Image: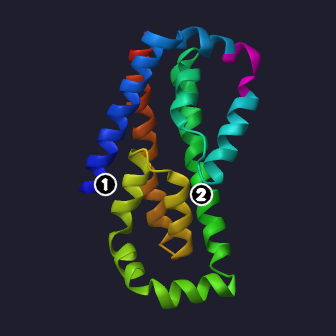
Amino acid sequence: LAVVIRGFFALLFLIAVLFCIDFFLIDINTLINSFFEKYSAKLLMSVFFISESFLGLLPPELFLAWASKSSHPYFNVFILATLSYLGGIVSYIIGGYLYLIPFIKSFIELKISKHIINMRKWGGFFIVLGALTPVPHSLVSLSSGLIKYNFKKYLLWSLFRYLRFLLYALVIFKILKF
């Protein structure tokens, strides 16, 4: 519950920051338009996929803002959500391979085995939180692979990523007056 509350406040904070930046500093619409014109959609989506596959360092909201200015915004939101979902699968697989490293395997089995039991029990809840909140989905996916969380369940719970992209797109599109 605390994670959900923090995620909600993080989203409110992000919205407030966007409003302040747009009102006091720069016109976000102009910035996004120049960004959109400068780089191709394929390049932007490739960069996004790489980010979503490896630690999720770039916030998806930037790419949603870009999508809001494209000729087919909701189609691009769907593509971004799909790339995020697929990037999560890549992270899950990386986590599975990291578990094969003897040092990591022994650390997991000796130091955090009690937490793994809870993670396997409540893993779906954590995956949904990672899919819906600003918590990087890539890290949740990597962790799921590390603990060998059931892959089919992971795939199912990760589908909430599509809901997140839709909800965030609706907010961002409204802010950017799409």
Residue 34 placed where, x, y %? 68, 12
Q: Please name the residue shown 68% across and 87% down the image.
A: 102
- Which is nearer the N-term, disc 1 or disc 2? 1
Q: Please name the residue shown 69% across and 82% down the image.
A: 101
Q: Please name the residue shown 38% across and 16% down the image.
A: 174
Q: Amino acid at mark 1?
A: Val
Residue 65 visible in the snapshot: yes
The residue singled out by tag 1 in the image is 3
Q: Residues within 10 Å of mark 2 (few under 14, many from 20)?
A: many
Q: Amino acid at mark 2?
A: Ile
Residue 43 placed where, x, y %? 76, 31
Question: Closer to us: mark 1 or mark 2?
Answer: 1
> Which of the 4 quarters of the picture holds residue 161?
top left
Q: Which mark is residue 89?
A: 2
Q: Residues within 10 Å of mark 1 (few under 14, many from 20)?
A: few
Q: Which mark is residue 75?
A: none
Up-down: is 81 above or below 54?
Answer: above
Q: CA distance from mark 1 to mark 2?
A: 23 Å
Q: Is residue 40 magenta?
A: yes
Q: Please name the residue shown 65% across and 39% down the image.
A: 48
Magenta region: which residues? 35-41
Up-down: is 23 above or below 65?
Answer: above
Residue 178 visible in the snapshot: no
